[in-house]
Amino acid sequence: MLTTYTDYLNQWNSQHPDQVWLRERSGDSTTDWTWSQAHREINAMACWFESRFATTGQSVGLLSRNRAHWYFADLSACAAGHVVVPMFTTAPGETTDYVMSFTDMKVLFVGETENWDQVRQVLPEGILLIALPGVDLAQEHLRWEDLVAPFRGSMPAYQCQADDLVSLVFTSGTTGVPKGVMQTHSSNLIPIARFSSTFSMAVGAKFFSYLPLAHIAERQLIEGSSLVNCGEVHFNENLTTLLRDLPLCRPAFMFGPPRVWEQLQQGIIAQFGSQDAVDAALEADAEGVGKMIRDKLGLDQAQYLLTAAAPTPPALIHWYDRFGICLMEGFGQTECMGPIVSRKEERRIGSIGKPTDDVEVRVSDEDELLVKAAGCSPGYYNMPEKTAETFVDGWVHTGDKVRIDEDGFYYITGRVKDYFKTIQGKFVAPTPIENIFTENPYTEQICLLGRGYSKTVMTSVLSAIALEQPREVIEAALLERVKAVNTEVDKHARIGAVIISSEPWSIENRVLTPTMKIRRERVEELFGDKAQELAREAAETGEILLHWM
């Protein structure tokens, strides 16, 4: 195995210079970049870095939608020995302010981004702004085209090493301030090689880039995997064109958090008109309808479809199974990517699978998942205490609680810090209760509250299927589900009420992180007062309450 990103870039430039690596779409037109074109562009910018900075190790920010020049900016900074700090295009100003200040950011590449009006107000004094092609900034800035022009055809003097610090990937910050997870060439390439083998990625495989590249999963599974496997990446123009762009790519591999699979599900149901129409079509011709949907989504050539980053409702996985679309669950985090995944020959719905090859896993006395493997992060940037808490004697303390069944399958049962105590002073683990509750087809986003409450309260957002049903049908189904949950959990953890939110939870209303994880503290902020009121009433009356908001 080669040991740096630049090794792979040089290899494919030498062996397949005219092969397309990256494809961008804008409306009806496409722009392709071959390995040789990309190689020339990346190394030209790396040479500019060397002409501008006397030392390596500068913090270089990257704020843009997914596009070819995101890769070019990323790899050029690495090739010159600098440290890339990718930032979410939806992050609020206070988060970007913290990241830029904390890393002492010297350069910021700016592409198309939703949050520029907030970011520009908190820019550090003296930071160099570099506009990617096609982007105009009102602030003083440099232009990509002008910087690379004098250096095309040149190569940087710097020689990358496997243990170079190449990136700081900031966690979503569901609790506390974001932590900058340090990444080296090795901590990227070793996991990529490991899951390339597990997922059976072929040389020349096609990849679809649509999730934020500031997320380690998109960066490794798509950008990194394309480098390691000489793949071809198709960039989604924007989320509104997802159903147009995905079939034009027909990827061999695709990763999506549960929210993405839910949104695709909604699109399919909408095209049929209703879930009843979907059921009727499948009953009449399951094989034909399945093939039609796989073709329409562009998943007909997919070898592996991964759902991870948050718990996936079993009902959603079963729904896709009916179309011959097999979603595989797995586990990974920025500190230790992809140590546990499901395999086609070994799949148990609800389980994240089994450890991959060359990964050691153990469970602590507190049921916390611990991982030891080559390719883990070396720690958190400028946070020695946090590093010492998480990285102990070579073991990564993931913060996730797990159980293992009799056949060796792993199940996430919650986060160590998500446990809360009700008014009775007894601990409640929300994730197992949420998992049982998701076995209904009428909710797609849920979060259990109860810290200090008389009863626990399930907050929820309705699914596309539920929106077709009368209110009384939904209420009856949710009441039955609560009763089923309450027969399986301890008395102090039983659900006393369900809140049904009229507004979907999203990144925009800050209930979801940029990686589509639910922020429990934000749900508490929005629904906590009403939830506590309902919990008291449920405890007093002994009834299960439903409340629409």
Image (tube, rainbow, N blue to C red):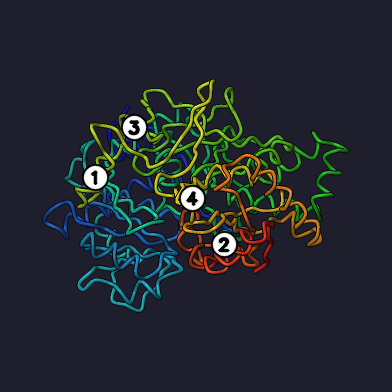
Crowding at label 4, few (<14), some or many (≥20) Cα neighbours within 10 Å? Answer: some
Task: Inspect the image, locate mark 4, and give the three-letter code of the amino acid beneath it.
Answer: Asp
Mark 4 secondary-structure assignment: strand
Q: Amino acid at mark 3?
A: Ile
The residue at the point 51 percent across, 62 percent down is 523
Q: Secondary structure at mark 1?
A: helix
Q: Nearer the viewer, mark 3 or mark 2?
A: 2
User: Where the C terminus falls, by quadrant?
Assistant: bottom right
Q: Residue 156: percent from the left, percent from the top?
A: 20, 47
Q: Secondary structure at mark 2?
A: loop
Instruction: Look at mark 3 in the image and give the residue it sits on.
Output: 190
- In depth, the one of 121 and 242 nearer the eye is 121
Quick one: label 3, few (<14), some, or many (20+) residues within 10 Å? some
Q: Answer few, some or many: residues within 10 Å of disc 2's Cα (few below 14, many 20 plus, some between 14 and 19).
A: some
User: What residue is disc 2 on?
Assistant: 505
Q: Are marks 3 and 2 in contact (CB under 8 Å)?
A: no
Q: Earlier in the sequence, mark 2 or mark 4?
A: 4
Please report whichever mark, 3 or 1, sits nearer to the chain's N-terminal start. Answer: 3
Q: Mark 1: few, some, or many residues within 10 Å (few <14, many ≥20)?
A: some
Residue occupying image coordinates x 54% and y 58%: 454
Lateral position of residue 53 relative to residue 242, left or right: left
Q: Secondary structure at mark 3?
A: helix
Q: Which residue is mark 4?
A: 32
The kind of residue on which mark 1 rests is Thr
Between the C-alphas of marks 3 and 4, the distance is: 28 Å
